[in-house]
Image (cartoon, rainbow, N blue to C red):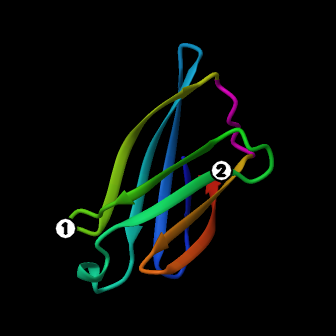
């Protein structure tokens, strides 16, 4: 599980390695008070050093608790290690924020 937060957002990426495959669960939380100001946002995630994990989504939305959660249909051979760090970039309302997710 990789977790981290910036000034406006926090995120958790869970990596599951089962039967020779690796799958991902993505969760992004908006930390601000005015959720109604965010109609849609985009995000991009990649491994900081190796570039092994690399996925994104555009025009996604938050639920009423200010959370976006998604099981990603991406499947790779197991390549993520606990030493990896992920970097996420979130873009919304002509703003952007980058922060690092570390293994917990």
Residue at image coords 80%, 50%: 49
Q: Which residue, as the protein is rendered here, is positioned at the far right?
A: 49
What range of the chain is rendered magenta? 78-83
Callout 1 touching callout 2 (CB < 8 Å): no
In this rendering, position of residue 104 left or right of residue 38: right
Residue holding disc 1 = 64
Residue at image coords 64%, 22%: 77
Label drawn at residue 46: 2
Q: Position of residue 85 (x, y in %)?
A: 70, 53
Label drawn at residue 16: none
Residue at image coords 34%, 67%: 40
Q: Position of residue 27 (x, y in %)?
A: 41, 54
Decide which of 3, 30 is in the foreground and name it: 30
Predominant SS along the magenta part: loop
* SS assignment at label 2: strand
In this rendering, position of residue 67 left or right of residue 2: left
* SS assignment at label 1: loop
């Amino acid at each position: 599980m990789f977790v981290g937060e910036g000034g406006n957002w926090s995120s958790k990426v869970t990596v599951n390695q089962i039967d020779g495959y690796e799958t991902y669960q993505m969760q992004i939380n908006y930390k601000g008070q005015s959720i109604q100001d965010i109609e849609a946002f985009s995000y991009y995630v990649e491994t900081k050093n190796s570039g092994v994990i690399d996925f994104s989504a555009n025009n996604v939305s938050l639920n009423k608790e200010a959370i976006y959660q998604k099981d990603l249909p991406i499947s790779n051979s197991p390549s993520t290690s606990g030493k990896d760090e992920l970097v996420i970039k979130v873009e919304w309302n002509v703003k952007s924020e980058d922060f690092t997710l570390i293994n917990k």
